[in-house]
Every structure is written in C-alpha cells, then in structure tokens.
Amino acid sequence: MRRTIDWADDAIVIIDQCALPAEFRTLTLRTADELIGAIRRLAVRGAPALGAAGALGVALVARAGGDVVAEAARIAAARPTAVNLSWGVERALAKLGDGADAVLMEALAVLDEDEELNRTASAHAAEVVLAACPRRPLRLLSHCNAGSLATVAWGSALGVVWHLAERELVESVLVDETRPLLQGARLTAWELERAGVPYRVQPDGAAAAAMARGMVDCVLVGADRIAANGDVANKIGTYGLAIAAAHHGVPFVVVAPSSTVDSSLASGAEIVIEERDATELTEFGGTAVAPAGAAVFNPAFDVTPAALITAVVTEHGRFG
Ligand code: MRU
C-alpha cells in the first residue's frame, strides 16, 4: 500500500480517509487552509500521521513564503489532542533558519522514520502481548484505527497484529466500530480485509460482553498523547474498554511512537480533549437520528489512567 501521507510535485498527497471504504482515492493539498480542512474533517488522521502532516504543512508554508511561524501555529492548532501534530510542526519549524529546502528535508525525515519507529514499537509490543497472554492463537480486540492509515505506514496497535499474523499467531480480531465516525468499521476492517487477517466488526457496546464471554485475550490500542505518569489519551471509548478489561483480567496494551509522549504534562488530567460537532451524533449519512436541536456531548477522546494499562510500549520498549 502507498504511504498514508507523502510529498509529491510540491504538494502534500494523502489517502482520503473520508472516502474509505467505499472508494480509495488520494487528495492533493497545496495550501495551509486545504491541509487544516483535511485534518479537521479527518481525511488525514491518527496521531503519527498527524505528526507527518504537521511537518509537511510547515514545508508547504515555508515554500510559499509569508508569515511561516503564524501559518505553522494555525496548522498546529487544527486539532488539539494528538501531541504529534504540534511535535511535527515544531520539528520542521526548527529548520526554518536554514531555508525552505532544509524544512522540507526535515519533514521528509519525519516520514521516513515513522514506519521504522512503528515497526519497532509494535515488535516490542508483540513480545509483551505474547508474555501476557498464554492462549494460542490469539483473539485480539481493536478500538478506532491505529493501523497503517493512522501512521505514514505500518501502524502502531494494528502493527502488533501484522507482526503476530506473520507468525500465524492471530486467530481473529474483534473490531470496535468506534462511534461516531466509525474509524474501526471503515478503516481498521478495511486494513484487516486487505491483509487477509480474520476479523469481526462489533458495536462498541459489545466489547465488555465479548470479554465477559471469554472471547478476548488482549486489547490493543494506540494513543494520541501520553502524560509523564503513563495516563493515555485515545479515541473516546478507550477508557471504558480499559475498565472492562481490568474487570475481566484481560491485558490492555497501548502502542505508540515516543513522539506521542508529552512529558510536559504530569498527568492525563492536563490533556486537552477535542469536542466535535453535534451533527456527528445527530445525523447519520445526512439523515436526522436525534430530535432537531438535541444537545450533545461529543468528546473525540478520553483519558485512561495508567493504573488500568498493562503496558505502554514505544520504540524504546515499555514506557514508565
Ligand atoms: O480522531 P482520530 O481518528 O484521529 O483518532 C485516532 C485515534 O484515537 C488513534 O487510536 C490514535 O491516534 C493512535 S493512531 C496510531
């Protein structure tokens, strides 16, 4: 599969994740506004992919000239929770004094490193899973999409599935559909289908019942920001999954590159949680599914306390 996000002909090229799984198409982004729009509507999404988007965004505005620092700040603020976005922006911006070409080189280095870091992190995590779960082959549970589409290539939590599947150690993956934007049903299931790994999509509300029935050996998720104490922000519903996993004695493993760690935050209580538009809940495919004007609570992420997590794994091994 091609990279989720790349640079070609002086522009950013992304796989349009709003179109999947119905259509595989790419989008070419030539301005900061086009990039910010794509980030906000989740055409490019997932913490490591947002790191690449931030770095390439600075390359884009550096080549255009003007107030690069102000444009970079706008890109970094497009979504607040995944620290990788501002990390990528800052990494590329640090090269601005050396000129636009140096900024682009740094952004391309971010992309080149991403697959290697995620492969390494997920290889470490695969060993953690094998040590924590005696049953073979494994029955895994995935939430949101932490696959190739959430990174430049390979994936973090789903990268663990790729490593284990290569060793024929995966029986199946239960895929949380991941309300309300269905990153699990649309994107994770699409990736598993293409890879030929057996899976079943389930409503998010079925996860605890699946654990109660003994159908899950391990929960695998990615992360959008990891605080210094090991608390983890990830897609809404992750916290509830962790509570259910702890109740049922199911290992709960978080996989992320170290660019997702924000050691400036003492705990997850300090993480800013994005709240998204009401229509994501009140409409489905353009049809109203709630009374007109219904008030909503639509946080895109939640924070799982470190105490509920078996291991947070980065390319350096276990965190904390
Ligand atoms: O709103 P999204 O789709 O960007 O949320 C993505 C997630 O929550 C992922 O689990 C996280 O970014 C890790 S991706 C390797």
Image (cartoon, rainbow, N blue to C red):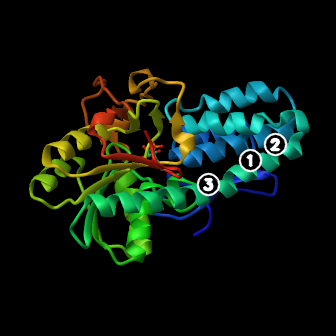
Q: Which residue is drawn at 42% across and 60% down?
A: 158
Q: Name the residue under label 3.
A: 114
**Residue at position x 49%, y 32% in the image:** 81
**Left or right for 205, reference 270:** left
Q: What element carries label 2?
A: helix
Quarter where residue 287 is shown: top left
Cβ atoms at labels 1 and 2 below 8 Å apart: yes
Q: How many labels does the image show?
A: 3
In the image, residue 134 sits, relative to residue 223, either above or below, namely below
Which image quarter: residue 32?
top right
- The amino acid sitting under disc 1 is Ala
The percent position of residue 13, horizontal first and vertical second, equals: 68, 55
Residue at 50 percent across and 55 percent down: it is 121
- Image quadrant containing the C terminus: top left
Q: Earlier in the sequence, mark 1 or mark 3?
A: 1
Foreground residue, 106 or 54? 106
Where 143 sits versus 90, above or below? Answer: below
Residue 37, image x, y percentages: 60, 38
Crowdedness of circle 3 by 10 Å Cα count: few (<14), some, many (20+)?
many
| Residue depicted at 28% across the width and 61% down the height | 140
Q: Which of marks 2 and 3 is in front?
A: 3
Label 2 crowd bin: few (<14), some (14–19), many (20+), radius 10 Å: many
Return the residue at label 1.
107
Secondary element at image label 1: helix
The CA span between labels 1 and 2 is: 6 Å
SS of the residue under disc 3: helix
Dot 3 amino acid type: Asp
- Looking at the rendered structure, the kind of residue marked 2 is Val
x and y, in percent, of residue 250 in the image: 20, 52
Q: Distance between the residues labelled 2 and 3?
A: 17 Å
Please give the residue where the numbered disc 2 appears in the rendered image: 103
The answer to whether one can see residue 271 in this image is yes
